[in-house]
């Protein structure tokens, strides 16, 4: 059994470790270096905001952490596993098990109800259908939408749609949530509600959250704010 001290130290270990990351895009023959020898450790259970000017590489960095893209050089270790050397198929499975995605546009399917949208990621897993529905309902309860399970996206407000998207992101119980401008399309009040929800998921469900944002109010909610300038952390 772990001692309390050992447990605490394991708990605060970096869950996300990037080391010497370069990312270069090619436009025809022209090479554009977007990230330059970037290293970053994000502790387990933290809520971090990533800020910086447009084009500084925030989404690129987030996509690397989420296993949506690969670095040109350097290593990415998440939860003790190197993900930069996985095959496409392994990476897709790894993402489904480990990462919840929350985007500025909620990306809900309009022909599905809230609960059907939340169930979607579970279709890629071996969870049986009865259990899928139960887990989707639990996720919707966590985000405060128990009463709206059978509503279609068009019957929901923007803030409620984002809650459904968050329920969909947590239905698989991932350790890490990556959020790209999660409040970008919302008014101040709805944005604050979403940020409160993210805080709750961080504190109560111990989700590690990495959030790209241009909004200083949103960044204030996070425990740590990191800034990117021209592909390097400042
Ligand atoms: N697939 C791609 N191919 C070529 N260039 C790309 C690609 N994706 C991003 N870039 C370029 O990389 C740079 C960084 O883009 P990125 O989207 O990471 O910036 P950002 O900081 O998230 O910007 P914003 O705040 O505007 O969303 C930009 O110059 C962009 O044009």
Image: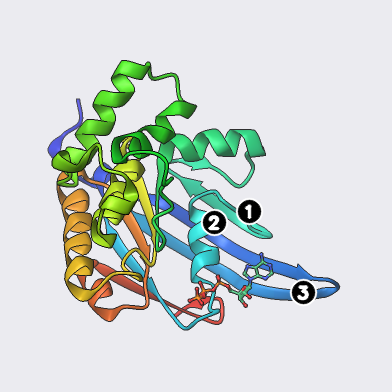
The mark that comes first in sequence, 3 or 2, is 3
For disc 2, the marked residue is 64
Residue 90: give x, y in percent of width and height. 60, 33
Residue 165: give x, y in percent of width and height. 34, 49
Task: Using a 10 Å C-alpha cutoff, classify the residue at mark 3 as few (fewer than 14 neighbours), some (14 to 19) or many (20 or more).
Answer: few
Which label was assigned to residue 70? 1
| Separation of marks 3 and 2 at Cα, in angstroms | 18 Å
If the picture is divided into quarters, which one holds ligand 1?
bottom right
Which residue of the protein is positioned furthest toward the right in this rendering?
A: 29
| Secondary structure beneath label 2 | helix
Q: Are marks 2 and 1 in contact (CB under 8 Å)?
A: yes
Residue 63: give x, y in percent of width and height. 52, 57
| Separation of marks 1 and 3 at Cα, in angstroms | 16 Å
In the rendered image, the quadrant that contains the C terminus is bottom left
Task: Using a 10 Å C-alpha cutoff, classify the residue at mark 2 as few (fewer than 14 neighbours), some (14 to 19) or many (20 or more).
Answer: some
Residue 211: give x, y in percent of width and height. 36, 63
Would you say 218 lies left or right of 24 here?
left
User: Which residue is depicted at the point 50% across and 47% down?
Assistant: 77
Question: Taking 107 as reference, is 188 above or below it?
Answer: below
For disc 3, the marked residue is 31
Mark 3 CB near ligand 1 (8 Å cut): no
| Secondary structure beneath label 3 | strand
Q: Nearer the viewer, residue 96 or 226?
A: 96
Q: Nearer the viewer, residue 149 or 111?
A: 111
């Amino acid at each position: 059994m772990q001692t309390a001290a050992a447990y605490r130290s394991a708990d605060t270990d970096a869950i996300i470790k990037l080391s010497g990351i370069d990312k270069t895009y090619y436009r025809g023959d022209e090479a554009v270096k977007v990230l330059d020898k970037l290293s970053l450790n994000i502790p387990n259970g933290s809520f971090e905001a990533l800020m910086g000017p447009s084009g500084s590489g925030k989404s690129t960095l987030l996509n690397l952490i989420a296993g949506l893209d690969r670095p040109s050089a350097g290593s990415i270790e998440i939860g003790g596993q190197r993900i930069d050397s996985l095959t496409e198929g392994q990476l897709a499975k790894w993402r489904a098990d480990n990462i919840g995605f929350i985007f500025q546009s909620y990306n809900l399917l309009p022909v599905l109800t809230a609960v059907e949208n939340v169930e979607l990621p579970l279709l890629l897993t071996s969870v049986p259908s009865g259990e899928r529905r139960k887990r989707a309902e639990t996720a919707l309860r966590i985000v405060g939408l128990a009463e709206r399970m059978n509503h279609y996206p068009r019957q929901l407000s923007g803030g409620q749609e984002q809650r459904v998207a968050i329920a969909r992101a947590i239905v698989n119980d991932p350790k890490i949530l990556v959020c790209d401008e999660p409040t970008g399309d919302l008014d101040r009040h709805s944005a604050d509600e979403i940020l409160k929800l993210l805080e709750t998921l961080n504190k109560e469900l111990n989700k590690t959250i990495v959030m790209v944002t241009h909004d200083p109010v949103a960044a204030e909610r996070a425990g740590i704010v990191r800034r990117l300038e021209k592909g390097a952390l400042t």
